[in-house]
């Protein structure tokens, strides 16, 4: 097994989604039953281990899909390596 393989990563795009849809954090926090500090952590993309229950509540409250608020960032392709994605 090779060490330090870059598989890419996920980014929370929740804050930009809220801005585009003109939805306040206060509204979402209330509808998704979240503490404002917890919601801010998701909005700032500072979550290390996302909670699927929290993500489900956010998606339910916003009537959106997970892909609307989370994106997968593919790894950078280095010279001589292929990206099999």
Image (cartoon, rainbow, N blue to C red):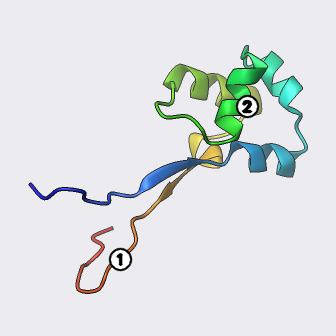
Picture coordinates of residue 11, whole percent (x, y): 56, 49
Q: In this rendered view, identify the residue nearer to me: 43 or 20.
A: 43
Q: How many marks?
A: 2
Q: Residue at x 58, y 40 (%)?
A: 66
The CA span between labels 1 and 2 is 32 Å
Residues at marks 1 and 2 touching, judged by CB atoms closer than 8 Å: no
User: Does residue 84 lie above or below 80 as drawn?
Assistant: above
Picture quarter with the N terminus: bottom left
Q: Is residue 17 left or right of residue 55?
A: right
- Residue 37 sits above or below residue 42 on the image: above
Q: Quadrant of residue 35?
A: top right
Q: Residue at x 49, y 34 (%)?
A: 48
Residue 40 bears which disc, if any? 2
Residue nearest the observer in this picture, 77 or 55: 77
* Secondary structure type for disc 2: helix
Q: Name, please, the residue furthest toward the bottom.
A: 79
Percent x, y of residue 4: 24, 57
Badge 1 or badge 2: first in the primary sequence: 2
Q: Which residue is mark 1?
A: 77
Q: Position of residue 76 (x, y in %)?
A: 40, 72
Q: Is residue 60 above or below residue 83?
A: above
Residue at 49% over, 49% down: 10
Q: Nearer the viewer, residue 49 or 33?
A: 49
Q: For residue 34, what is the image quadrant?
A: top right
Quarter of the picture containing the C terminus is bottom left
Q: Residues within 10 Å of mark 1 (few under 14, many from 20)?
A: few
What residue is at 30 percent from the left and 73 percent from the top?
83
5 or 24, which is in the foreground? 5
Quick one: SS at disc 1?
A: loop
Label 2 CA crowd tier, 10 Å (few <14, some 14–19, many 20+): some
User: Which picture quadrant has residue 2?
Assistant: bottom left
């Amino acid at each position: 097994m090779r060490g330090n393989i870059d598989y890419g990563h996920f980014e929370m795009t929740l804050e930009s989604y809220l801005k585009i849809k003109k939805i306040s954090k206060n509204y979402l926090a209330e509808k998704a039953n979240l503490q404002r500090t917890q919601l801010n952590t998701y909005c700032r993309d500072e979550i290390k281990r996302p909670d699927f229950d929290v993500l489900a509540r956010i998606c339910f409250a916003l009537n959106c899909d997970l892909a609307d608020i989370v994106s997968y960032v593919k790894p950078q392709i280095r010279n001589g390596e292929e990206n099999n994605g």
